[in-house]
Image: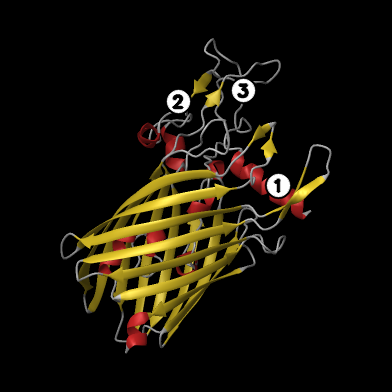
């Protein structure tokens, strides 16, 4: 069972091209999910934002801002921070698949901040077999990304950041797949992000209005062998937040994150009405009935992603997913969080509620998150995610 499950996970990552979503000639597929390599880069790595519907592009800065919006580091209140986060994956079925995240930031001066993080995804132990079913060894597939960011204030209310990322994905450990030798995939990527915030007031209540945007994983395609290369999950994330100081002890924040993958949407191919197989043109390529050719460069794929859906404007709008969250703080020591994430049924159908809490005590902070799926099974259902933060300012005092 464990081997079969792990194999399905590998296949879901490697088989990023498929015709299961396509229908007959001239008909639009009802399911047309956009898939990429290294999807672990899109998993919410920390319990705070994970408890707020995977929303964090404009939330208040914390040590985990690298994933959501590195530009927030420029407005961090602390001089230095360090955090560790852990998320079990498919815990109800497999005990050794998990996502671990380590993040660090250091303020250089009142205007500049640097940060680094490591995201590690372990697929546990997998027993590989040959074509006749004989065991050939136990391997440990894994993926990770190593990030560095520089953030700077551009004005009193605006900051910007650039981040560099190295991505390593070793899923097959050099095994032969389909008669071809495989190797670990590597890629390099960059993030460009902005963060704006301004103090506001409503009658007798003061607050903070913020807006953030982050284009992440702008980078080279990745390959696991001699075959074609696949896109990594270049993603556009943007949204506002509003924090209200109710009184000296109570504060509440509301936030919305909107996401869109900036990679080509799979087209609908013409199929033979008798065999049901895609029709090949004179150039050896499958004939496209609707949509655009997905075999393009990374930069062209980013711009093409805004207008290449086979179903037109309606399908393009369904490619936006939305995460909403609310966070309540008491005396800046205890937090309660909740959120909701929504994705179109034809683009993955992820719909779930999230709950969580946080506590700060002296030099330590602890966040927990819990996910409740609505439409389908989720790898994180019935599991708790944990994040531990260290406040170096409080420690030095």
Q: Is 2 on the left-hand or right-hand side of 53?
A: right
- Is 170 in front, or is 62? 170
Q: Which quadrant would residue 124 be assigned to in this image?
A: bottom right
Query: Compared with residue 183, is residue 205 higher up or lower down, i.e. above or below?
Result: below
Q: Identify residue for label 3.
A: 24
Q: CA distance from mark 3 to mark 2?
A: 17 Å
Q: CA distance from mark 2 to mark 1?
A: 31 Å
Q: Visible in this render: residue 72?
A: yes
Q: Which quadrant would residue 285 be assigned to in this image?
A: top right
Badge 2 or badge 1: first in the primary sequence: 1
SS state under label 2:
loop
Q: Quadrant of the C terminus?
A: bottom left
Q: CA distance from mark 1 to mark 3?
A: 30 Å
Numbered tag placed on residue 327 in the rendering = none
Numbered tag placed on residue 7 in the rendering = 1
SS state under label 3:
loop
Q: Identify residue for label 2.
A: 292
Q: Is 130 on the left-hand or right-hand side of 204?
A: right
Q: How many marks?
A: 3
Query: Compared with residue 378, is residue 236 higher up or lower down, i.e. above or below?
Result: above
Image location of residue 125, percent across then percent down? 70, 57
| Extreme residue in the left direction | 155
Q: Which quadrant would residue 394 be assigned to in this image?
A: bottom left
Q: Nearer the viewer, mark 3 or mark 2?
A: 2
Q: Nearer the viewer, mark 1 or mark 3?
A: 1
Image location of residue 308, percent across then percent down? 42, 30
Q: Nearer the viewer, mark 2 or mark 1?
A: 1
């Amino acid at each position: 069972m464990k081997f079969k499950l792990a194999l399905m996970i590998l296949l879901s990552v490697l088989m990023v091209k498929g015709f299961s979503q396509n229908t007959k000639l001239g008909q639009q597929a009802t399911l047309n999910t956009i898939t990429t390599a290294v999807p672990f880069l899109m998993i919410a790595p920390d319990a705070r934002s994970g408890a707020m519907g995977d929303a964090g592009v404009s939330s208040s800065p914390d040590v985990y801002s690298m994933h959501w919006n590195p530009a927030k580091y420029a407005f961090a209140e602390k001089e230095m921070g360090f955090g560790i986060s852990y998320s079990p994956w498919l815990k109800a079925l497999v005990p050794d698949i998990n996502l671990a995240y380590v993040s660090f930031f250091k303020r250089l001066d009142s205007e500049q901040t640097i940060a680094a993080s490591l995201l590690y995804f372990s697929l546990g132990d997998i027993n590989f077999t040959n074509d006749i079913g004989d065991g050939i060894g136990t391997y440990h597939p894994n993926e990770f990304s190593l990030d560095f960011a520089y953030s700077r204030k551009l004005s009193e209310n605006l900051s910007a950041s650039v981040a560099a990322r190295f991505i390593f994905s070793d899923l097959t450990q050099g095994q032969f797949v389909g008669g071809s030798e495989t190797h670990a995939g590597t890629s390099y990527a960059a993030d460009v992000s902005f963060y704006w915030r301004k103090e506001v007031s409503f009658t007798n209540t003061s607050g903070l209005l913020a807006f953030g945007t982050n284009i992440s994983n702008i980078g080279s395609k990745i390959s696991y062998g001699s075959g074609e290369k696949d896109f990594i999950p270049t993603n556009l994330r943007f949204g506002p937040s509003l924090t209200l100081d109710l009184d000296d002890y109570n504060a509440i924040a509301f936030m919305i994150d909107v996401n869109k993958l900036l990679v080509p949407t799979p087209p609908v191919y013409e199929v033979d009405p008798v065999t049901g197989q895609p029709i090949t043109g004179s150039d050896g390529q499958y004939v496209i009935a609707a949509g655009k050719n997905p075999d393009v460069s990374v930069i062209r794929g980013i711009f093409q992603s805004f207008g290449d859906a086979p179903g037109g404007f309606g399908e393009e709008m369904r490619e936006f997913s939305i995460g909403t969250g609310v966070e309540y703080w008491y005396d800046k020591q205890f937090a309660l969080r909740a959120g909701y994430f929504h994705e179109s049924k034809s683009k993955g159908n992820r719909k779930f509620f999230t709950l969580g809490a946080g506590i700060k005590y002296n030099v330590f902070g602890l966040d927990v998150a819990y996910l409740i799926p609505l439409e389908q099974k989720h790898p994180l259902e019935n599991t708790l995610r944990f994040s531990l933060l260290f406040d170096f300012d409080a420690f030095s005092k």
